Amino acid sequence: MVLDYARRLRALLDAGLTNFFWQPTSNTTVALLLERRAASQPDAPFLWFEGREHSIGAVNRAVNEHAHAYAALGLSRGDVVALAMGNRPEYLFHFYGLAKLGVVAALLNPNLEGRALAHAVESCSPRHVVVDDERLPRFGALRRALGESCPWRLWRDDDEPDSDSDTLARELATDFSAALEGQPHHDPPSTAELTLDDVKAYIFTSGTTGLPKAAVVKHHRFLRAGRIMGGITGTTPSDCVYVCLPLYHGNGNIIGTSMAITQGARLALARRFSASRFFDDCRRSGATVAVYIGELCRYLYNQPPSNADRAHAVRVMLGNGLRADIWEPFRQRFGIERIVEFYAATEGNAETANVLGTPGSCGVLLPGKMALARYDIERDELVRDAKGFCKRAAAGEPGLLLGAIEGKNEYSGYKSERATRAKVLSDVFKRGDRWFNSGDLLKRDRLMRLYFVDRLGDTFRWKGENVSTQEVGEQLATHPDVLDCTVYGVAVAGTEGRCGMCALTLRDGGRLGSADALDGAALFAHVSALPAYARPRFVRVVSEVTTTVTFKHRKRELAEEGFDPSRVEEPLYVLDAQGRRYVRLGEAVYADVVAGRWPI
């Protein structure tokens, strides 16, 4: 049955590549589909935001106003505009208005600061930067540094006036509303001139390391994602897709908004994720499909049980990052018919989806399109034979996921040609082949189902063994008193490699005790299910595990702070292997650890 599903999924992906919708010369972009929907049913509801419904005709007219405004500013096909705004309807007006002109929208993370922000803006070479008034103060220093080389446009939120920012706004940016005045509502002729090979957006991703990189998203990738994910989830015009993820992120935009437009469905948009309002928003908007990422589902599951848990119409949740330990409990508690976990990378070409609903799986290995290559963690390199070719990972063995670059399975990569080339591997399994390096370790079972193992930078070596932070985290998370956790490697003086450390958030009144009085014996008993080398050596008890805006754990900062009690305010514990428990780590014990007197 699984192999049959693999064939069906491969057929669906291939259909998406060969169908006229994805021919490079086709002009059937998502922007054109928006126009067609507006022309056929102008009064049909399309966009829900904070209790207000916008018709598809009204949305298209607003998008057209923005397109004509940008054209009046001298922008045309191939130019770049950087957007730094929060979730709201106007974000989509800007985004699709630019798309109708063939202008590339560089979707900035508005939470970036300092060097990362400057790098993101400079790397995409925008003609204009559009920022909302909430984020203007944060961008002020960069605006002054760039001088007049790039005009800035301010989008003002009339619902939330802030007189304190007026002076700053006048100094740093021109009000975009002036450009909108008197603009026509009709569809610009440029929409029909675009092809699916035109670049629609730059979405910034850090990849495995380094500063943000601008991943290239062409119109065909945007359209294809909506069609394929819409097909897998069975999304139809009677559905409503709920998006609370930031629109500068792939799951929120490439998946969420594209699904709604390509499938003829409605779109429900939230400013941001709220665990307490998530299903209430779904109820009010009539959402039937919801998009998730990272630990979002765990935050929902950790909410106090309520009689309203199933009082919604959501039948499918689509995303990535849902751990196996809460998959079925989450689905049962909230009455979700299907969870569709998928694997994809904004800049990559290796993508698959779990169409079976197998807990913990992110899809199936698609022969000819994807491969798992054996990887040596200690040497940080692919395992090659005497002829220099890579070996494929066996069932159950973690391997580096690769995406074949051939024929229709193209790889758009990054705006930077150097960064694009760095992700391409050649002569992998045969002379002349080319593969996209995902930077992710996955494993397959004998039925070709795929399971995420770790990012290459997260997996570490300890006592001659590879330790998967994902595996350790999943075991910790199965304890009912562990609300959230993350695992990372830390260096210990006098030892090779890195040893495991975890940050935990505990349930109040649970059997594991409290932050200041952890039941170290009970925690040790729980992690004893892991191999001895994989058990965390250090434990940090925190009030919450901090995440990125896309609900991925912030491990780098935790690893840098390590287990030094002079740097860490929260309670720390260290493994006492002989006593089969964790004990409090203070200055004296810390001194023993770094001096090699405490067995690690």
Image (cartoon, rainbow, N blue to C red):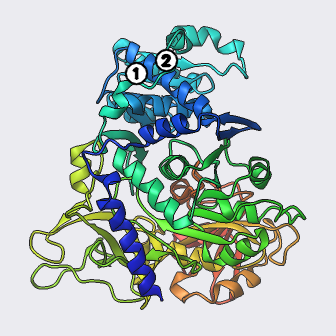
Please provide percent x and percent y for residue 51.
77, 38
On the image, the x and y values in percent for residue 157 come to 66, 22
Image coordinates of residue 210 in percent, x first then y, are: 37, 49
User: Residue at 50% across / 63% down in the picture?
Assistant: 231
Residue 384 vertical placement versus 137 (above, below):
below
SS for dot 2: strand
Q: Is residue 108 visible?
A: no
Q: Where is 42 relative to 547, above or below?
A: above
Name which residue lies at 54% across and 35% down: 38
* Residue 125 shown left or right of residue 325 in the figure: left
Secondary structure beneath disc 1? strand
Amino acid type, mark 1: His
For the residues labelled 2 and 1, the Cα–Cα distance comes to 7 Å
Closest to the observer, 21 or 362: 21
CB contact under 8 Å: marks 2 and 1: yes
Q: Which residue is mark 2?
A: 153
Task: Tell me what residue is drawn at x 54 percent, y 30 percent.
Answer: 60
- Residue 397 versus residue 359: which sits nearer the camera? 359
Name above or below for residue 166 compared with residue 589. above
> Mark 1 sits on what residue?
128
In depth, the one of 188 and 301 nearer the eye is: 188
Q: Which mark is residue 110?
A: none
Q: Position of residue 512 (x, y in %)?
A: 80, 76
The answer to which image quadrant residue 598 occupies is bottom right
Horizontal side of 170 relative to 6 (left or right) equals right
Q: Is residue 183 visible?
A: yes
Residue drawn at x 65%, y 84% is 527
